[in-house]
Image: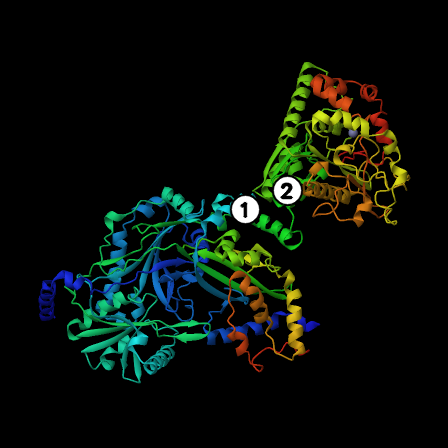
Amino acid sequence: MSWFELNEEKFHHCCQLILQQSEQLSDGWIWEVVQGSKEGYLRKTALRSVTIDSKSVQKQKGSSLDPEPHTSYHSSVEQQGQEDEQPDCIKDDIDDEDAGICMMTANSSQVLQFEYHILYSCSYSSPVLYFRAFTLEGRSLTLEEVWNSVHPNFRLCLQNSPLDTITQQEHPLLGQPFFVLHPCRTKDFMRPVLQAAQDQHRPVNYVLSWLSVVGPVVGLDVPLKYSTQLHPAASLSSTEPD
Amino acid sequence: MQNLAVQRLTEVVMASDIGAAAVADLKLQFAPFSSALEAGFWHQLTQKKLNDYRLDESPKCIKGYYYNGDPVGLPTRLNLEFSAFDVDGPTPARCSPAAGTLYNTNTLDSFKTIDKKALLEKEAKEIWDAVQSGAAWKDPSSLCRFILLTFADLKKYHFYYWFCFPALCFPDGIKLVQPPSLLQHAFSAKQMAALQEAYDGLCMKEGTSAVPYFLMKYTDDTAQLAPLGDWEAFVTDTKKVTVGVYDPCTLSQHPGWPLRNVLVLLANQWGSRVDTVEVLCFRDRTLQGSRSIQHSIIFQVKLPELPNSSVCPKSVGWEKNKKGAMGPRMVNLSECMDPKRLAASSVDLNLKLMRWRLVPSLDLDKVVSTKCLLLGAGTLGCNVARTLMGWGVRHITFVDNAKISYSNPVRQPLYEFEDCLGGGKSKAMAAVDRLTKIFPGVNAEGYNMSIPMPGHPVNFSQTTLSQAQKDVEQLEKLISEHDVVFLLMDTRESRWLPTVIAASKRKLVVNAALGFDTFVVMRHGLKKPPVTQSVSTAADSSPSCSSASSSSSTPAGSAPSVPGSSLFSNIPGHKLGCYFCNDVVAPGDSTRDRTLDQQCTVSRPGLAMIAGALAVEMMVSILQHSEGGYAVASSSEDRMNEPPTSLGLVPHQVTHRISSGSNVTPGASLIEVQCCSCSPIVLDHYEREGFSFLSKVFNSSHSFLEDLTGLTLLHQETQAAEIWDMSDDESI
Ligand SMILES: [Zn+2]
């Protein structure tokens, strides 16, 4: 049964393969090394334009467990706050009369930045997905806001998913707050995947298979080409017992 | 050179003669950069401000980057992430770097008053110097610069900021000769393939994954690219020169900002000698593994003359705020940076995890919003408080009159050695301090007061009497203000008054008491609202029921009896007894250990932790029951049935004996009609006479209550019961 386990060495090997494929597919995964340490993690950022559903944000605020009203990134709330504290405009000393600027039209959608990290957890012997989402100003979204940025049809199905065990934790390497898909169920859903691969003598990249299951829960796409591109020779043949 | 300047001047005059209206719609317009800050950037700025910069306001070098592979619809961004402060660090693959200058002010006032125009002009001058010296030809990335003005309010975690992307301007703009068109309309597939290959070749040659500016020559089936600096050797035909720019914009009619300064560079050097400049805005995106450059745009401009090459041209570049006005932005990051807020949201999320994972119907709000009054801040009080915190309970109030002694900290997890010094701090106050340290989001209060007890006279003087009255009033007020009262004292008598008050006010009471190696945790029966209460209790409760208790129920571990067979099945919450109603020993436990050391006054250390934890868990289960304190008492037999709450059984009481290894045994007891504490006659007297009745109880010997209710003496019961109220403070 040991091949169901993912040790750190295997994890790094799997990550290397993903990086190679990502490079070919320009999928944006990079290996980030923590300064002054040999530890690192896979990292990817993605931008998404989100239409703000103000009603659902309001509705979510009923529960006292949800942090105070400041939870809301509802634009009107935020702007009100800003108007009070915003330093005065400094129009007088800035001349922006320039015909060369193309006027950008504001639309109702907001661009959100998503950041995904894949780390190895020694305690669970499995990969762990850390993520956060923030506005272009760099303000991290609360979990409720992240859910609200997901299309309502998906939201319900995601919240009932057995994978939605999301908590907030300090990033073990960066010390900044991130959301974490809790790894406690990882082995449960990986076992059949690995078993099937073994039965069919099919090579499998543990981290990639895992990512294709958990990624979509938090809006992270894993292009199909990763798996079609997976060449037996280049892949980690974790199906073969050592 | 002078001739050249004169010549240019005349051309400017000639150009301005052309009708302004006709030219206006043919002028080139650039899409400005939008600043895009990653959460990590602010974290890093905070660290820098705290550890490196401190009060240093001098400009700092930082680094941003932009990307030409965005899908349509995204704004043209200049990104700053946590690595922005590591100027020598790598730029993300396929991204082009931009050098920046950070001005972090120490006050909001200097943020507001700093001369923005001067900052822009200073930066523009540097770009202009690079243009004039020719340095920009060798390092064209120096043309793409930015300024970031910040003020970090680290008390509120408010960050004020304003970006500027300096661009040198031609006084009359840039005339479009041929409007932008998509590359796929201008180039054949073969040409695009050749261009893509040539670009990759150039990147490889330059040792980078993104070349910001390049020169280009092409035929019907070939494309040749060269670095900007190779102009002299590469450009042979000055009639039309093609310049490529790595373009972060996704608009089909406009180039992005990085083109601006390179056009100034070209105009300054070659202005009059080049007829037309063809601009390729190179956009290179990969979607689902498929790469394409066909959405790049291409157009032609007439390079304008710069009026006077020795004077830095006018510059623009301060970013508009979200409202489209010329002004700075503010972002409030307290939620993700204020440790107290982080603690609060993490605690909540942690609890939600329990709901998501294991108990989907768990109503956490009911638990979290419960106001808990802890009477006693000793071993039990400390453990109850910690468990309540674990459940996310925010409102916790302690009542205790003791001071922390040297023997306490090892058993009472809210206190430390230091708390014992100088006579010891008040337990109630020290407990509040510690809770706040453990979790600043808690709303804790402490009351250093004693609870008057039966048989402990308060009538020594007018002062003691009025003090007792004040204490009673305070206790009544506190019980009214809370939802659940925990009785966690170390004397039996001190539980009497709060039991009476809470019964009268219909407040849920959870009682925990310790023996040497056994404990009881129970909920008091919750009486029905006053109108119907007295009649029904009297009719329903029969004394024989309670006396039968110890013999009728099954010992733990034996086969469950037929459901409903026990006299203790289905006792509704309003008929359940209180701590004083009868023996508090569980009905199932008939094998009493008579060899206990009757002299021992200290309980086994692990007991309070178990009992304290169980008391809280019992409260949570009760809260989850749809009927709350009126819930029917679960018995051992109910273990086989569908549990009444998402968290399982809601027993009346649980007892545990460590020495015999017996499990926690649920049991139930009926209300005692003659109870000295919760019987109608006692409540009736309390409600009618108030303190005058209470003071009689305090001042008289036990016989007063005995006479009133006809019950055995409190103190005798204490002797008989296996549960003592044990104090950790008592020395023998
Ligand atoms: Zn009673």
Is residue B720 placed above or below B268 in the rendered structure? above
Tell me the quadrant of ligand 1.
top right
Residue B560 left/right relative to B523: right
10 Å neighbourhood of mark 2: few (<14), some, or many (≥20)? many
Query: Would residue B27 be found to the left or right of residue A42 on screen?
Result: left
For mark 2, give the secondary structure.
helix
Instruction: Give x and y (percent) for residue B341.
Output: 52, 46
- Considering only vertical position in the picture, is A204 above or below A51? below
Q: Identify the residue position indicated by label 2 in the image.
A: B367
Q: Amino acid at mark 1?
A: Asp
Res B526 quadrant in image: top right
For the point 66% across and 77% down, the residue is A198
Image quadrant where one finds the C terminus of chain B: top right
Work out how far the residue at label 1 is from the one at label 2, CA to CA, in angstroms.
14 Å
In the displayed structure image, the side of residue B270 where residue B88 appears, left or right: right
In depth, the one of B193 and B345 nearer the eye is: B193
Q: Position of residue A6 (x, y in %)?
A: 64, 70
Number of dots carrying numbers:
2
The residue marked by circle 1 belongs to what chain? A
Task: Report the residue marked by disc 1.
Answer: A66
